[in-house]
Amino acid sequence: MNVSEVLTQTAQRYPSKPAIVFRDNPITFSGLRDTVFQLADGLLKLGIKKSDRVAVYLPNCPEYVYSYLALFSIGATVVPLDFMLTEEELANCLNHCQGKALIAKEKESLSLVSLKSKVASLADIIVLGSGNPGFNPLTGISRATPVDEWRMGTPPLRGSRSFEEILSKGSAITPDIKIDDKDPALIMYTSGTTGQAKGILLNYRHLDGTPEAMKHFVDLSDQDVKISPLPLSHSGGLIYIQNCIVFGITLILMERFQPLEFLKNIQKYRVTCFHMVPSMYYAILHLKEFESFDLSSLRWLVVFGAPSDPHSLRRFHQYCPNAHLLNGWGMTETCPPNTVIPLGSKKIESVGVPAPNCQVRIVAEDNRQLQQGEVGEIVIKGWVVMDGYYKEPRLTEEVMRDGWFHTGDLGRFDEEGFLYIVGRKKDMIKVSGEIVYSFEVENALLKHAAVQEAAVVGMPDRLRGEMVKAFVVFKKEVQSTPEELRSFCREHLAHFKVPHSIEVRDSLPKTPSGKIQKEKLKAQEII
């Protein structure tokens, strides 16, 4: 994707139309273009060059969007980092990718001086929202230092700049940088739900993957208003930005997901569509105020990122009958979405059919292709598959076999070619030789009126090999007991699938994008 060209064309078509609304303040497409190009020019003058790795460490805000698009416009490699990362995690990612520059916002728990001392490659730190680049008093830098004092003389932190200064030194001219499809565009760090972070390397052609799939699956147009509750550092958040500049939609950008505010914004801005992860969806459904909002403007919504509970999806439809409920599937490694239910389909238990830009198969452990109805690993092939895990050839070889990316997800196809997610390979539990998929146990638990969230894992057991253990969070207004839940499960599951143990918790650990971290639950139990 030539981002500067796409942005220029969209701004020419809709110059005064709001591109982004943040904290009730609209930013027009012409304003977005000018700010992006001004920032791009400022970055070039700073010395940022094509393919330089520049990290972005911000909460959701317009400056995150500006940074993405400006860096893409000059052919840099963007390294989006979640604002929840600790200083140690941030340093690890920056050292791994050898980041040249960092665009960041003040955060009390982070010291810029300390961070810079840990990352030898870091030449420039661009600080948003403060004339003083010291993040907190622990840096030893006085916040009272006047902006001009460090800007004109010796800065408190060598190589530090303010975001506003970089912007002010640029001109709103279209960048003249030749960018090839295979040039590196993104390194997206993801730990998913299974452990150590990996840097997913995507190129500039990969930026076309999502818009192409969206054109196929849904009817986005310049009349649409989307709302983003997802972190912009996540692939699901980046999709909103791509939708904005490619289709000319208006994006309602939330700083963070708050269920009540999310519903208020849908009603206020007459939002027409959105996509989110299941945990966010369940949080909305369990609000006591949910039924009081006018959601009639919604045309469709997509739930993706983890297996979804069909019962909950149907409940939403009761209060939003005109909206298409779509289930989808995809991974950061494969430019999501890769499968989505077609508009009008009633197969809500499925995650849909594959997009035209990829092939999807179900295979056995020996890579043999399985027939419809058989459960195996989902593999995917096509130009949408990542270039690899950055600087991790062994990890890349483990997942790429004969041109097919092995996702680690388990699924099956039905007779009409619809894909169904069964769970993760690591979530498959073997109880006395019988196979139990955590997803089906979780779905049974979620049918109970008292259960808001559920996570099921396999735990070591001398007698059975593994046993099924469930963790649940109850709704505030309804309570139950583990024994009552086990009895309920016996009505819906075979005896060997019924949880041997059920633990009630106030909350479940999640990734920043909202996925339940089962590895943490298992680790806590083993310890």
Image (cartoon, grey):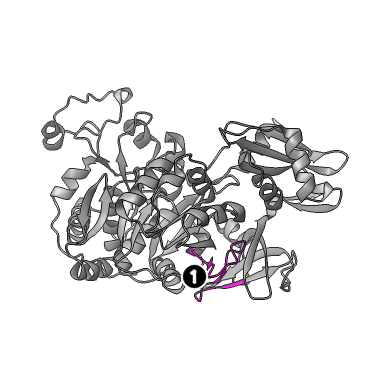
Provide the residue designation for mark 1: 343
| Residue 486 point in image, percent of width and height | 76, 39
Most foreground residue, 11 or 171:
11
In the rendered structure, the answer to whether residue 133 lies left or right of residue 199 reads left
Q: Could you say which quadrant of the image residue 329 lies in?
A: bottom right
Q: Confirm whether the magenta stretch covers residue 355.
A: yes
| Above or below for 448 versus 416 | above
Residue at disc 1, secondary structure = loop
Residue lying at the far right of the rendered structure: 463
Q: Residues within 10 Å of mark 1 (few under 14, many from 20)?
A: some
- Which three-letter amino acid code belongs to the residue tagged 1? Leu
Most foreground residue, 37 or 7:
7
Image point 29% across, 67% down: which residue?
A: 222
Count of residue discs: 1
- Residue interval drawn in magenta: 335-360
Residue 253 appears in view: no
Work out which quarter of the rendered image holds the N terminus and state it: bottom left
